[in-house]
Image (spheres, helix red, strand yellow):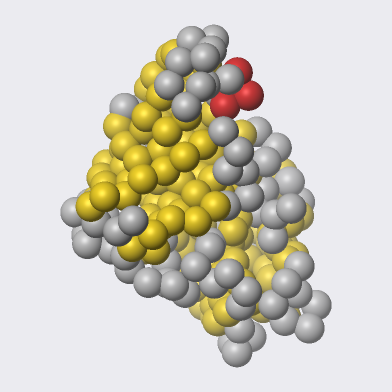
Amino acid sequence: DAGITQSPRHKVTETGTPVTLRCHQTENHRYMYWYRQDPGHGLRLIHYSYGVKDTDKGEVSDGYSVSRSKTEDFLLTLESATSSQTSVYFCAIRPQMNTEAFFGQGTRLTVV
Amino acid sequence: SQQGEEDPQALSIQEGENATMNCSYKTSINNLQWYRQNSGRGLVHLILIRSNEREKHSGRLRVTLDTSKKSSSLLITASRAADTASYFCATDGIQGAQKLVFGQGTRLTINP
């Protein structure tokens, strides 16, 4: 298995609180991605990174920010969590464009 | 909107039968990939087919790509109970090639 770890694996938080999810890789891959998975929507791209300090928005980026200060870590922050952000969040990595991606085990986030 | 749309959304067949899932996409691509997701787990890469390829095989998997119709199919032959999972297509577009955009998935159930 690719060396990719998401933390925490489960989290319950209250509406309006900030939340940060962490994705850590040991593969030294250039590209890192954050997706959310909801019933009926498949996986939707939130943000991705193509290098340290290089990030860009995906299709559902509103309400989310990201940071990548080191190759191995990609952080996803919900500045003020809302119930609509209740979801399962997946991190993925890949060495370069046009190659396969490797996924973490997911973080189940519940906003109450 | 998402790049990939899959059909059917759910498929239930008997063990030993073949399963076919389809994926349509909207813009020109560099490649198309298929992933499997077992319940509650991260996605696992199955196969990647490049835009200049028409067919690719991997074990019991056969993938076709028709760029003129912007569609792909995944065929699983001689299905097994262990093939029960959700299957997703994903595309690397020519525009925005750093993104990896997923479809909504097909839920496959293999009945013993």
A50, B74: nearer the viewer: A50
Furthest residue in direction right, as rendered: B69
Furthest residue in direction left, as rendered: A26
A54, A59: nearer the viewer: A54
In the rendered view, tell whether residue B51 sits above or below residue A39.
below
Residue A52 in picture, x, y percent from top left = 30, 58
In the rendered view, tell whether residue A96 sits above or below residue B84.
below
Q: Is residue A104 visible?
A: no
Which residue sits at x=60%, y=89%?
A: B52
Counting every numbered tag in the picture gives 0
Q: Is residue B65 visible?
A: yes
Left or right side of B28 for A52: left
In the rendered view, tell whether residue B61 sits above or below residue A92.
below
The quarter of the picture where the C terminus of chain B appears is top right
Residue B99 in picture, x, y percent from top left = 53, 63
Which residue sits at x=72%, y=80%?
A: B66
Furthest residue in direction bottom, as rendered: B52
Which residue sits at x=69%, y=60%?
A: B3
B95, A65: nearer the viewer: A65
In the rendered view, tell whether residue A84 sits above or below residue B101.
above
Residue B76 in picture, x, y percent from top left = 58, 63
Residue B84 in picture, x, y percent from top left = 54, 44
Which residue sits at x=36%, y=45%?
A: A67
